[in-house]
Image: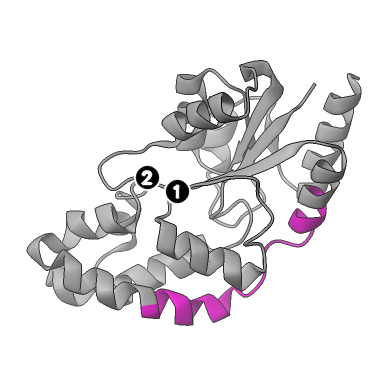
Amino acid sequence: MIKLIAFDLDGTIGETVPMCIRAFEQAVSPYAGHTLSEREITQTFGLNEVGMIKVVAGEKWREALRDFYPVYEKMHDECPEPYEGICELIHTLKAAGILVALITGKGEKSCRITLEKFGMQDLFCSVKTGAEDRPNKADAIEELLAAYCVAKDEFYYIGDAVSDVTACKKAGVPCLSAAWGATADISGLEESNPSKVFFSIEDLAHFLRRLQKGI
């Protein structure tokens, strides 16, 4: 029986990854001394925005971080809504008595901006954000399991990245891979998480219904 499901945010709940990259490039490049490439930015993924900016801006990270948030919030107008069907899925899970949480690598402030833009700030029983010094999703999963007294086989994590699969393996819990976003690494997900890759929210919802019924 499923008791708790946690969702990733970027690329799972909304098409926010391209916007995040552009905001980072615009706000932080002046402090890095050159125009940051997409590769330079994505190589810092897994850390929150403080850690990401520290990696590329060095001693000027505080100024870069100060400039990042207004740019991020303004650019969010390009992505004003979550994926179609995701809020309905979350409401359906909650109506079935399943706890629904959020675990993201984003920092607390950028996460709050996104959830407020999406009108989802009150939707989750718990929100776990990222750390600046290391990827911490496995730790966040363990904290959720302990806080809600949930066994590992009663929990699922839903995320769009291969690193999400790795974090779930480290925590000893199953991962369901969201491959409906434009930036999903489909081949990487299929290789690392075979038979658990979903190409639409509808397909994921169908799988979860069957799982809950024990079919």
User: Can the viewer see residue 81?
Assistant: yes
Inspect the magenta stretch and tell me whether residue 98 lies in it. no
The residue drawn where x is 64% and y is 68% is 118
Can you give x and y, in whole percent of width and height, for residue 194 in the image? Answer: 63, 25
Answer yes or no: do the residues labelled 1 and 2 have beta carbons within 8 Å?
A: no
- How many numbered tags mark residues here? 2
Q: In which quarter of the image is residue 15?
A: bottom right
Is 172 in front, or is 99?
Answer: 99
**Dot 2 amino acid type:** Gly
Task: Quadrant for the N terminus, please.
Answer: top right
- Residue 165 is left or right of residue 80, and the answer is left
- Stretch in magenta: 70-89
Is 125 in front, or is 58?
Answer: 125
- Residue 13 is left or right of residue 164, and the answer is right
- Residue 123 is left or right of residue 116, and the answer is right
Q: Residue 46 carries which label?
A: 2
Q: Which mark is residue 95?
A: none
The residue drawn where x is 15% and y is 68% is 32
The residue where tag 1 is placed is: 129
Q: In which quarter of the image is residue 195?
A: top right
Can you give x and y, in whole percent of width and height, for residue 53 in the image? Answer: 24, 60
> How far apart, in angstroms, are the residues tagged by discs 1 and 2?
11 Å
- Residue 34 is left or right of residue 97, and the answer is left
Sequence-wise, the earlier of marks 1 and 2 is: 2
Can you give x and y, in whole percent of width and height, for residue 11 in the image? Answer: 57, 54
Can you give x and y, in whole percent of width and height, for residue 157 in the image? Answer: 61, 34
